[in-house]
Image: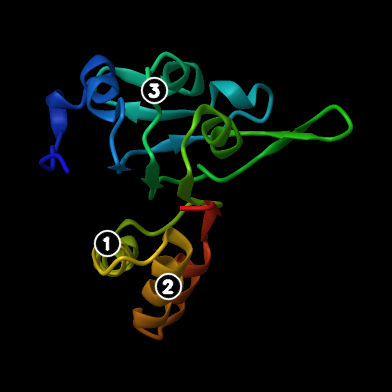
Amino acid sequence: EGATVVLEGGDARVPRVLRELDGAALAHIAAHGTFRADSPLFSSLRMADGPLIVHDFERLDRSPYRIILPCCDTARFASVGADELLGLVTALLPLGTAGVVACTAPVNDAAVVPLMLALHKGLDAGLSLAEALRDARAALPGDAVHQATGWAFSAFGAA
């Protein structure tokens, strides 16, 4: 297992982020997310030098195995045709990402912190993304902001 790489500020530029994402066992991208209902595959995560879009993930040799996206609207979808939903999550899974935790709505940044800390604690204990998310929700303070934040997240895939 590789060492943890943290990219902050100006280091979180699209080319560098893509290099670190390529083949990662676990990626956690804390950034602002933007959903494009008019063109879901151009939904993006804001990096220091501009947007990281779905098409950027397609350029990777190997998509990250698991991805955590505590970014607003990363789990939103738009219907395309009669039977297809498109968005960031639905684009990542066919690329080889086995599991994604993403957010369906704008969330309170401060309330996300205890959720993410508890989520990683569960992953460190060997839980799947869904199990770790379940336990992280249960560990949150009982106030409305923390509870709503916990329920804004969903786990997708099998990892």
Q: Residue drawn 58% across and 31% down?
A: 94
Instruction: Specify few, some or many for label 1: CA neighbours under 10 Å numbering under 14, 14-19, or 20 or more.
Output: some
Q: Residue drawn 44% across and 69% down?
A: 131
Residue receiving disc 2:
145
Q: Residue furthest front?
A: 1
Q: Residue drawn 32% across and 39% down?
A: 31
Viewer-side label of 3, 1: 1
- Amino acid type, mark 3: Leu
**Earlier-in-chain disc, 1 versus 2:** 1
Residue receiving disc 1:
120
- Amino acid type, mark 1: His
Residue at mark 3 to residue at mark 1: CA–CA distance: 23 Å
**Earlier-in-chain disc, 3 versus 1:** 3
Residue receiving disc 3:
52
Image-quadrant location for residue 132: bottom left
Closer to us: 35 or 91: 91
In the rendering, at what x and y percent does residue 62 appear?
Answer: 38, 24
Instruction: Specify few, some or many for label 2: CA neighbours under 10 Å numbering under 14, 14-19, or 20 or more.
Output: some
In the rendering, at what x and y percent does residue 65 appear?
Answer: 38, 40
Q: Is residue 109 above or below residue 86?
A: below
Secondary element at image label 2: helix
In the rendering, at what x and y percent does residue 86 appear?
Answer: 67, 32
Secondary element at image label 1: helix
Instruction: Specify few, some or many for label 3: CA neighbours under 10 Å numbering under 14, 14-19, or 20 or more.
Output: many
**Earlier-in-chain disc, 3 versus 2:** 3
Viewer-side label of 3, 2: 3
Q: Is residue 116 left or right of residue 12?
A: right
Viewer-side label of 1, 2: 1
- Amino acid type, mark 2: Val
Q: Is residue 87 left or right of residue 72?
A: right
Residue at mark 3 to residue at mark 2: CA–CA distance: 29 Å
